[in-house]
Structure formats: C-alpha cells, structure tokens
Amino acid sequence: MASGEPSPGTGAARRPLHSTQAVDVASASNFRAFELLHLHLDLRAEFGPPGPGTGSRELSGTAVLDLRCLEPEGAAELRLDSHPCLEVTAAALRRELPGSEEPPAEPVSFYTQPFSHYGQALCVSFPQPCRASERLQVLLTYRVGEGPGVCWLAPEQTAGKKKPFMYTQGQAVLNRAFFPCFDTPAVKYKYSALIEVPDGFTAVMSASTWEKRGPNKFFFQMCQPIPSYLIALAIGDLVSAEVGPRSRVWAEPCLIDAAKEEYNGVIEEFLATGEKLFGPYVWGRYDLLFMPPSFPFGGMENPCLTFVTPCLLAGDRSLADVIIHEISHSWFGNLVTNANWGEFWLNEGFTMYAQRRISTILFGVDPDDTYNETPYEKGFCFVSYLAHLVGDQDQFDNFLKAYVHEFKFQSILADDFLDFYLEYFPELKKKRVDIIPGFEFDRWLNTPGWPPYLPDLSPGDSLMKPAEELAQLWAAEELDMKAIEAVAISPWKTYQLVYFLDKILQKSPLPRGNVKKLGETYPSISNARNAELRLRWGQIVLKNDYQKDFWKVKEFLHNQGKQKYTLPLYHAMMGGSEVAQTLAKETFASTASQLHSNVVNYVQQIVAPKGS
C-alpha cells in the first residue's frame, strides 16, 4: 500500500504526509505508480546440493500481486525490484473484465534491467496500458537458489547437526532476492503464503496466522500491512512451546526446553509494559524463533516472529532484556516505519528510546543508563533531547502513544514526525525550539558528527563506580585480597559484570598471575555460560596470554557463530602471541563449515588478510 494511503479499517482519512513525495534511491521499482493491495506466495522448498541444476536447493513457485493503478494517465509497465539470483520464467496478467468474476490470466512479456550491485529491475509490459484506478493481478513464476536474501544452512551449521535449514533475511534491501516486489519501506501491504516443504520439516513466517495443510504444506496470512523487508520465512527441524497467552518459542528440538524455561512468562511482561507506554500491540502474537548457532545477527524484528540468536539462551535469564529491543520494534519500525533507509533513525532511534523506557519501568534503572553504546547513537540522543524540551516524562510518554496512533501502518519521514511533535506541543512551537542556536532540528538531522545533546547518565554512576574500583584493585602489582574480597559481586547484574570486565580488559595485560587469580576468585565469570561474559573473558585471556583458558575461547567459537562475538575474538587471537595466532587458524579451519558465508569472509580477512 503506497505511503499516505489510508489503511483499510483505520477510520478517517489521514493527514497528508511528506513521505508521499519521498523518493527511494534504493528501489528500482515504480512503486508510486501502483497501490499494492495484496501479495500471495505459493512456494516449494527443496533441500538439495548447492549450485544450479535439477534437484539443487531452491525455492520455486509463484508470486501473485494484486495492484491498483495510481497513475492519472494510466501505466504501460510494472517495474519491480528483483535480483540476478532470482529467475523469473513466466509472467501473466489478469485484468478486470465486466461481468467476469475471475478473468483468465494472459501471458505477458517481461525483461530485466541492471540497477545496482544489490539488485535489478524486473519490468512487466502490459499489452494495453492499464487505466487510472484499474485493478489488475500480476502472476510471476520464478525460482531462487543461492543468493543474498535466502540463506541455506547445511546440517553442521545447525544446533542438531542432523537436518539442513533455510531462512530469509530482508532488511534492508535483500527481499528482492526472495520474491519480486516493491522493495522499499515506503510501501506496506498484506500478504499470504502457501509453503510446501520436504518430509520432516516445518515452515514458519512473520504472519498473523499459521495453519498446517496436509503433511507438507503450511498456510500463512499477515492481516496487517507491512513493508517487504519484514516478510520472513524459515524452514527446518522446528518445534514450539507456549510461553505466554500471546507468545510461543520456536527452536530445533535440542534447544526447545532451554528456550521455554528461559522465556516462560517473560515476553508477556515486556509486551504489557510496552502497551501501557505506546498503545495496543496490534500484531496478535509475538513468537521467538531461536535460530541455528551460525545465525550471524543478534535479532531481526520480523512481526509476529522475531528471529534471535541462540546466544540469548544464557540459562539464567540474564540476557532476557535483550528481547525488549526487538519487542520495541513492534511499535517503532514495524508499525510506524521509515519511508526510506536514509531515515533509518526513525526506526532505531525511537526503538532505543522505547527499550530504555520499558527497561526503566521493569528494572528501576535501565542497563543502558549505566553502560552501553546506545546513549551515543544520534537517533536516540535526538529523541532524548525532544523529551528534555518537553520536561515531563509522563507528557512525553503520552506523546509517543499519540505518535504511534497517528502514524500506525504508515511510512514516514522525519519532517512528518517533527510537524506532529510541534503540533502536539504548541507551546514549544511558539518558542521556536526547532531553531535554538546550536540545537537546530536541521543540524540534528543533516550535520554529521557528535550529537549536540547527550542524555544524563548520572543515575548509573553509583552502580558503575564499585566495578571500576574493583578493576583498579585487580590491576595492582600486589593484590590486596582483603579489599577485593570485601566487594561482593554476587548481587551484580550482567551489565555491571560486563562493565567490570571491560575495565579489566582496558587495563590488560595485568601483572603476572593476576588473571589466574581473577578466574579462581570469580568462577561465575571464568566459567560463565552467558555469551557477553564468555566474549569478554576470552578477550582478557588472550590479551594476557593466559593459555590455560585458551580452550574456553575455542569452545565458545565452536558453539556459536554470531558476528558480534566471533570477530572480536579472532582479532584478539591474531593480535596475541604465536600460540594465540595458531589457535585462531586451527579454530577457523575446524569451524568454517559451521559459519555464515559473510562471517567466513570477515574471519578470512582477519586470519589471512589479502596481500599478507
């Protein structure tokens, strides 16, 4: 649905939006010429060997686009975003005919045009131009194998090591390599899908409803309009467990018990807090899919089905609050969306702010208030500055709820948001807060560099100071064990332990013998299952060449392939002793087949850079 068009069922006509005139330089499509009313995918998945040819791994089937022409003069061609890895073999057109319920689909010609390194244009020609407001249906038969939007995993890249797995990753411009589409966040539409899988596999999608049809088919419907990048599919050896009235966890059988235990009841608490702050949760269900260990990202906020790394299964709920960020996207990003990727801060800046508000209400002090890179992200800082101008947290919370309600199911630009902000707070508009010297809104949005305002982080000082002082004690030539043992770290939260270890890392290498004593004193750190702590303990071990614990680094890299954890450890190994460098090369040789192809390329550059 073109941005600015009222969504069915949302009531009165919406305000005119700046985004209706916005261009999207990342799309090759003519998305302003048509309203996309609905998309249906009918696909069959085959898990064969990599590469082209009969029986290879691929998705094949049809994409059916229901459209309405928006061009006053009509349109002779439909241009969609596509990709060279996606092979269209046939195109057909079905047009409205008087007195005909289902007119026949007639074959039409199509061709591709180069666009960029991340895609191409698929051009479908109409024998006769369609009229303004005419409804039509375009049917595309296609297949896609290897490509950037569809990821195929071998059994060794999964947790169970028995069956292959596939998933799609749409953000930002990759779903054009999954199905032909208007691959721009400016366009939102509803979709349905029928997915056929081999015996023993289950399909899941970012959809409102999930229905099994026969032994090998799954039918999905998304009842709310979403942009193309949020349509997601995963197929594998998957099972599920209920963890709340509106939520399930999905995972491979070997992970499902851990997922259920860790997240039972937690998601509902996060959702309820978000609803109090930002308004109704409109997506129906909120399911988590724990991806195979080779999944290179932390999470992807696909509506109704967030994809997350299995690294969040820490065993003690210590990383459960990471889910708050993805849940916050349910309002900021999925419901109100940036109209192009140049306005990405509207998704992430608001999500960071929402994450901190939910965390503050649930935990008293938000971890990001104490230690995180988040406060230095410009989008978050700008939202914090706008809250600071209002001066009352309750008033700003009410504004956020009104903002979500005003722009739900639409894609907007910063100007749309700022116009609404100044209308909502007329006293601020009267004061001309948008042009305060040094803090002009235009400067925030268009001037690179350090943000002109940083939020107050002083509430976290009392929590961080003991960690800093303890790290200082461990850096001493002669350890004062009496002073060290006087500091009880057992009540510390994960973010305090992370801060402590980062300070230790900054002071490393420590005097000889101190790391050994550190590990013995805090086995809850040196033997942690929490991925954030394992990463930092590994970095400390490598920086201090504490070879007795090198095996822990190797084990961690064998157990997961998340980019955030994998790359820093390879950097640390290659920057360490000869023994550490040998460990890097041996570990990479034995784990490369388990890693995502992008991560393999990055590690290759670290371990054996070109030209070395």
Image: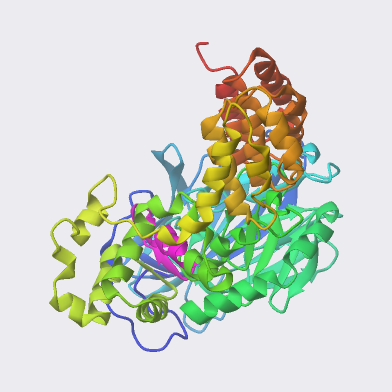
* Magenta range: 333-354
Residue lying farthest top? 612
Whether residue 594 is visible, yes or no, is: no
Instruction: Check if residue 349 falls in the magenta segment.
Output: yes
Residue name at image x 19 percent, y 81 percent: 427
**Image position of 188 with respect to 582: above or below:** below
Q: Report if residue 205 is visible in the image.
A: yes
Q: Which of these two is toward me, 135 or 29?
A: 29
- Residue at the bottom extreme of this rendering: 11
The structure residue drawn at horizontal position 49% and vertical position 52%, both measured from the top left corner, is: 371
User: Quick check: 574 left or right of 241?
Assistant: left
Q: Is residue 557 left or right of residue 147?
A: right
Rendered image quadrant of residue 71? bottom left
Residue 297 appears left or right of 294 = left
Residue at the image position 64 percent from the left and 26 percent from the top: 542
Protein image colouring: rainbow
Image height check: is 408 above or below 354? Answer: below
The picture places residue 102, in percent across and down from the top left corner, at: 57, 76
What x and y, as percent, mark residue 589?
A: 72, 22
Left or right side of 495 for 337? left
Where, quadrant-wise, is the N terminus in this rendering? bottom left
* Residue at image location 24% in from the left, 73% down from the top: 419
Q: Nearer the viewer, residue 2 or 363?
A: 363
The percent position of residue 133, horizontal first and vertical second, equals: 36, 75
Total numbered circles: 0
Along the viewing direction, whichever of 366 and 315 lies nearer the viewer: 366
Q: Is residue 89 magenta?
A: no
Q: Quadrant of residue 350?
A: bottom left
Question: On screen, 395 above or below 580?
Answer: below
Is 142 placed above or below 330 here? above
Q: Nearer the viewer, residue 169 or 348?
A: 348
| Residue 155: x %, y % from top left | 80, 40
